Amino acid sequence: MREAGVNLVSVGIFSWSRLEPEEGRFDFAWLDRVLDLLHEGGIQVDLATATASPPPWLSHQHPEMLPVLADGVRLWPGARQHYCPSSPIYRSAARRLVEAMADHYAKHPSLVMWHVGNEYGCHVPACYCDVSAAAFREWLQARYGSIEKLNEAWGTDFWSQRYGSWDEIVPPRRTPTWPNPSQQLDFLRFSSDALLECYDAEHEVLKKATPNVPVTTNFMVGFKPLDYWKWASHEDLVSLDSYPDPSDPASAMRAAMAGDLMRSLGHGRPWILMEQTSSRVNWRDVNVPKAPGQMRLWSFQAVAHGADGVMFFQWRQSRAGAEKFHSAMVPHGPVEQSTVWHDVVRLGRELGNLEPVAGAQSTASVAILFDWESWWALELPSKPSSRVRQIEQVEALYRPLFEANVAVDFAHPGDDLSQYRLVVAPSLYLVADEAAAGLVRFVQNGGALVMSFFSGIVDPSDHIRLGGYPAPFREMLGLDVVDFHPLADGEEVGLDFADGKQGRGAIWMDEIHLAGAGALATSIGRPLITSHSFGRGTAYYLGTQPDASATARLLQAAVAGAGVVPVAEVPAGVEAVRRGAARKSFLFLLNHRDAGVDVPIQEAGVNLVDGAQVHPGLMHLPPRGVAVIREGW
């Protein structure tokens, strides 16, 4: 580990059956030895609470704690996360274990961070058993206060669903056809909160025993079931597990987007890349290894987007179990023959040179709105088109900003947006009154807004906002959407831009009536992409999904109009990211190409990766090469 530059290790994540081999009897001797050895070697510990996988004795004694799917199928032990989040049996046993661990290890010198659970909701994001049903009813009573208000929020007069008492309510289990969408939305909220209660119970124990030790749990990329905005506010720092597909050309963009989201969830604070693989995973149909230099490149990319730590799953490649073919820092075979091992050692050495970067934050003038509740509601069934998927809509608008090296934050629609010059709202289907008013104020006060189709359609109860689409934004956008015209699979419409350029639109087409806005693009003479001066700002509206080239041109114009400039002017395929304040910053240059490239440098500095002096002119980056230039010091 010292050879590889390891200075932090996650320990005990799936060790409950070792730590508590039978109810109430704890065995810490083996873990004491591990932590003592790590401390003697100068390595710190992120100690996990081990509650992600209950031991066999617990589910054997209490099968009622096992989770149940919407169709009534019970999930059994033999994998992991086999627990109902609302189960008092599970919660009590988990708390007992965490109390014992906190008491035993509170003063251990290696302990620098607590790791609660693991990838909450990864396999069991919701449980539909009777215990969960009772907890759901309690959650609903706290939310609505009366059965009359619940009936109003759920629109239960439709399909004769009106409830007379709380006891009549069950989770949205398998039904003859679509369950009530408002009920489904609330159950998604409840399920996220139920798992958060599990986290909070452990967090409470740990902070009482070790108030100065930070507590985290690892998030996942593009994970839908948990409202990470709410979860992140309960963490001392945000951590992420990231496994981009090396065979996917969009992986670099997606990893950058994930990093920007994690940084934004912490409101700019540095985060930790808790898990990545050194080469290949084990769970795809075909587990393609990372190309030479790709692991190093993507590790530096995480740091560029705000990570202050880069970790791996796992240290030593497993000999047994479901993840034995998942790559590790130490492979099955001899390390001296392993390219992966030598790459890991190099990365550890180079990351050690980046210590001055730790703690440096980033600034962005552009924000993309992202809301889990809107995502949930958007993708519930019975919509004009099920082809409108939230992540795809976000990626379509993030990609051109990434490729242009424009710094991007993510923001909740209800956030104060005044620090940004440009805000992008991809299919913001559900929006609260306060958030809608905030967006209108943002444009009135001089901001630029790019909003795409199917936005502002429903309120937080998933009820249509009447008065014309999109009701809260019609005046700001200067238009009325008369009707939706979803496009069939493979169907496209032509786009004629006012500047004479052509494009294509897919997935969706709005029937738009202009009410003050001007048409930037039309289709068969009908407006489809518009702009509108409103107050001191400008609101753009995309009534279709333009092709990638057209989207890039539109965002380029919006960026320029808002006075936003890229981080740096570099060749295509090179990512430029800056951490730190003006005149005392770090410029990351990441070559995602398979070939070397010369990058123009404007100011002198030092490349922290190898300590070399950097001068104005051209700097050569080899294939998948990286540089971290300390500027203005």
Image (cartoon, rainbow, N blue to C red):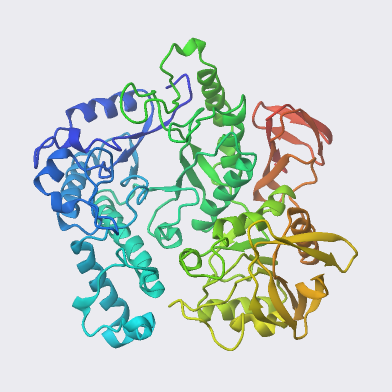
* Residue situated in front as seen by the camera: 70 or 99: 70
Q: Quadrant of residue 621?
A: top right
**Of residues 539 and 468, which is closer to you in this image?**
468
Q: Horizontal and vertical percent for residue 369?
A: 58, 64
Residue closer to the observer: 241 or 554: 554
539 with respect to 55 (left or right):
right
Say which residue appears at 59% left-offset and 73% top-offset.
Answer: 455
Quadrant in which the C terminus is drawn? top right
Return the x and y of residue 15 as percentages of the image width and height: 24, 35
Q: Position of residue 406 (x, y in %)?
A: 71, 53
Count of marks placed on residues:
0
Tell me which residue sits at (58%, 34%) in the image.
Answer: 246
Name above or below for residue 7 compared with residue 16.
above
Q: Is residue 563 visible?
A: no
Seen in the picture, residue 560 relative to 45 is either above or below; the reply is below
Quarter containing the N terminus: top left
Q: Residue 19 at x, y = what percent?
A: 18, 35
162 to 332, vertically: above or below? below
Q: Examine the rendering and report whether any part of residue 159 can be seen.
A: yes
